[in-house]
Image (tube, grey):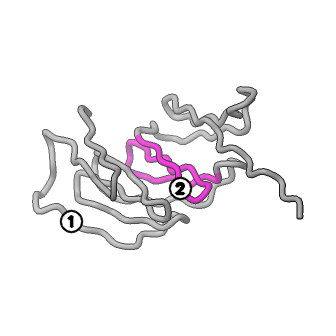
Amino acid sequence: MYRAPPALLPVVFLHDREAVALDPESGERRWRYVSPNIFVRMSFANDGVYLLDDACVLHCIDAFTGEVRGKVAIGGTFAGAMVTDGTRVFVATSHGVVALSAKGEVIWTHASSHASILNALPGLGVGSQIVQPDHL
């Protein structure tokens, strides 16, 4: 039985409030997504692109089509790190950690023991992935 090879994930370029997906072979634009806020973090999982903006809103975008799968305000005043284990997305914010499904639904939250983290960005590790941002 013949099966078409899987499509390649795009190269996603973030600039300010805009995310642009480029074909990795040709460099042609596949899709463009614009937010009212500035994008600060990005991760890939489940054929999706997860874009976190500076208002701590997570945008879940289909990597191939650019269609919005969902958006969720996760709370906090800034995001320190974002990683995925392939099925879930984990975000460390100034208020703690949030685990989200591939559709952007909150699975669980863990509040920080500090009222807020003002002088440091929280790091995050899942499996072999460790993200420790170096500055705001």
- The structure residue drawn at horizontal position 62% and vertical position 55%, both measured from the top left corner, is 47
Q: Position of residue 59 (x, y in %)?
A: 52, 52
Q: What is the number of the mark on residue 135?
A: none
Q: Position of residue 128 (x, y in %)?
A: 34, 53
Query: Label 2's element?
Result: strand
The reply to whether the C-beta atoms of the residues labelled 1 and 2 are less than 8 Å apart is no
Q: Give the residue pinned by disc 1.
A: 111
Q: Position of residue 129 (x, y in %)?
A: 35, 50
Can you tell which of label 1 and label 2 is closer to the viewer? 2
Specify the segment rendered in magenta: 41-62
In the rendered structure, which amino acid carries the disc numbered 2? Ala
Nearer the observer, 23 or 21: 23
Majority secondary structure of the magenta segment?
A: strand
Viewed as shown, does residue 39 lie left or right of 68? Answer: left
What is the quadrant of the N terminus in the image?
A: bottom right
* Circle 1 crowding by C-alpha within 10 Å: few under 14, some 14–19, many from 20: some
Q: Position of residue 65 (x, y in %)?
A: 72, 49
Residue 79 visible: no
Most extreme residue toward the left, as rendered?
A: 114
* Circle 2 crowding by C-alpha within 10 Å: few under 14, some 14–19, many from 20: some
- The structure residue drawn at horizontal position 30% and vertical position 48%, both measured from the top left corner, is 130
Residue 112 against residue 132 in the figure, above or below: below
Q: Give the residue pinned by disc 2.
A: 45
What is the quadrant of the C terminus in the image?
A: top left
Query: Label 1's element?
Result: strand
Is 56 inside the magenta-drawn segment?
yes
The total of numbered circles placed on residues is 2
In the rendered structure, which amino acid carries the disc numbered 1? Ala
- The structure residue drawn at horizontal position 52% and vertical position 34%, both measured from the top left corner, is 17
Nearer the observer, 74 or 4: 4
